Image (tube, grey):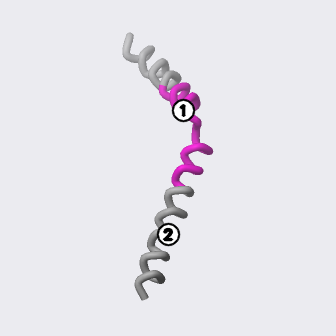
Amino acid sequence: MLSWIWIPVLYVVGFGLFSWLGGLASAGDAIARWGRETAERRRCTVSCSS
């Protein structure tokens, strides 16, 4: 019976921690920024070497 109490408590703590770290918007921005930097690096490697 105690496990049925711990499951929702852990979900709430997990969601609270994720929200405190910035949430989905912040994660999406980080992934988009990483994609732009990777594409720019590849574009420069291809165009700079030719």
- x and y percentages locating residue 43 in the rendered image: 49, 76
Label of residue 21 in the image: 1
Above or below — where is 49 with respect to 7?
below
Of mark 2 and mark 1, the one earlier in the sequence is 1
Magenta residues (range): 14-31
Q: Secondary structure at mark 1?
A: helix
Residue in view at x 47 percent, y 65 percent: 38
Asked whether residue 29 is drawn in magenta, I would say: yes
Q: Residue at x 50, y 69 (%)?
A: 39
Q: Residue 6, image x and y in percent?
A: 42, 16
Task: Identify the residue shown where x is 46% and y is 69%.
Answer: 41
The kind of residue on which mark 2 rests is Ala
CA neighbours of label 2 inside 10 A, class few (<14), some (14 to 19), many (20+): few
Which residue is at 50% across, 57% downward?
Answer: 34
What secondary structure do most residues of the magenta stretch adopt? helix
Residue found farthest to the right: 25
Query: In the image, residue 18 lies at what x, y percent?
Result: 52, 32
Image-based side of 2 in relation to 38, left or right: left
Q: Nearer the viewer, residue 45 or 8?
A: 45
Looking at the rendering, which quadrant does residue 2 occupy? top left
* Mark sitting on residue 37: none
Asked if 15 appears above or below 47 in the picture, the reply is: above
Q: Quadrant of the N terminus?
A: top left
Q: In the image, what residue type sits under mark 1?
A: Leu
Provide residue 27's location: percent of width, then percent of height: 54, 45
Q: Residues within 10 Å of mark 1 (few under 14, many from 20)?
A: few
| Mark 2 touches mark 1? (CB < 8 Å) | no
| On screen, residue 9 above or below 34 | above
User: As drawn, which residue projects farthest toward the bottom?
Assistant: 50
Assess whether residue 18 is covered by the magenta stretch: yes
**Label 2: element kind:** helix
Q: Please give the label number shown on residue 39.
A: 2
